[in-house]
Amino acid sequence: MGKKDNDSADWSPKEIYTMLQKKDGEGPIGLSPKKAYEVMSKNPQAVMIDIRSTMEHLMIGHPRDAIHIPWLDEPEWTPNPRFVTSVREVLLGGLLGEGEDDPPVVVLICRSGRRSMEAAKVLIDAGINNVFHVDSGFEGPLDDKHHRSTQAGWRFEGLPWQQC
């Protein structure tokens, strides 16, 4: 497999699986929102998990078809003690697809990419190795006027999303 960056040539599901197996402790792989959407579109076993708080998920909006499992949530704002267990439940134990051409992958998304990277590290430490995170999140970074969704992010890129 040749070197590809997160926004270059298409990745097959097998290439994704191989890349994940070779990363050897480098931490979670960040994807641009468009690349994450492409990965989700090409792999029927891929799952996107919105790890933001319940209020963010409901009121700000979320990627279409994303499963909501909060990493930090109100009122305590501490890591969800059932986070890894909940992700394993979604993956039916986390062993689906090992060695297959289209293994399941987990793509985590938060507001700006920071929390999803933290949560991805926890999943990797728990033995769930097929984890990506959306590097600019759903809303992206703050601009100079302290607004989000003006520079980067899932919503900025015009990818499918919904709001309650």
Image (tube, rainbow, N blue to C red):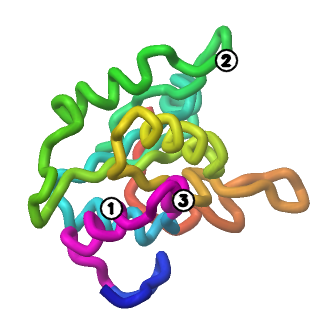
User: Residue 163: in sight, yes or no?
Assistant: no
Which residue of the protein is positioned furthest toward the top in this rendering? 75
Residue 116 image position (x, y, % from top left):
55, 44
Q: Residues within 10 Å of mark 3 (few under 14, many from 20)?
A: few
Residue 84 falls within the magenta-colored stretch: no
The residue positioned 43% from the left and 55% from the top of the image is 132
Identify whether 148 is placed above or below 118: below
Write the residue at 20% across / 30% down. 93
Side of 158 where 14 appears, left or right: left
- Of residue 160 and residue 18, the one placed in the foreground of this image is 18
> Residue 53 in the image: x percent, y percent?
56, 26
Residue, disc 1 = 21
Q: Which mark is residue 26?
A: 3
Mark 2: few/some/many CA within 10 Å (<14, 14-19, 20+): few
| Quadrant assignment for the N terminus | bottom left
Choose top left, top right, bottom left or bottom right for residue 15: bottom left
Q: Are marks 2 and 3 in contact (CB under 8 Å)?
A: no
Residue at horizontal 39%, vertical 50%? 131
Locate residue 73, reporting x and y percent.
59, 19
In percent of width and height, residue 120 lies at: 49, 43
User: What is the span of residues highlighted in magenta in the rendered image?
Assistant: 10-30
Say which residue label 2 marks.
Answer: 77
Q: CA distance from mark 2 to mark 1?
A: 32 Å
Q: Residue at x 53, y 42 (%)?
A: 121
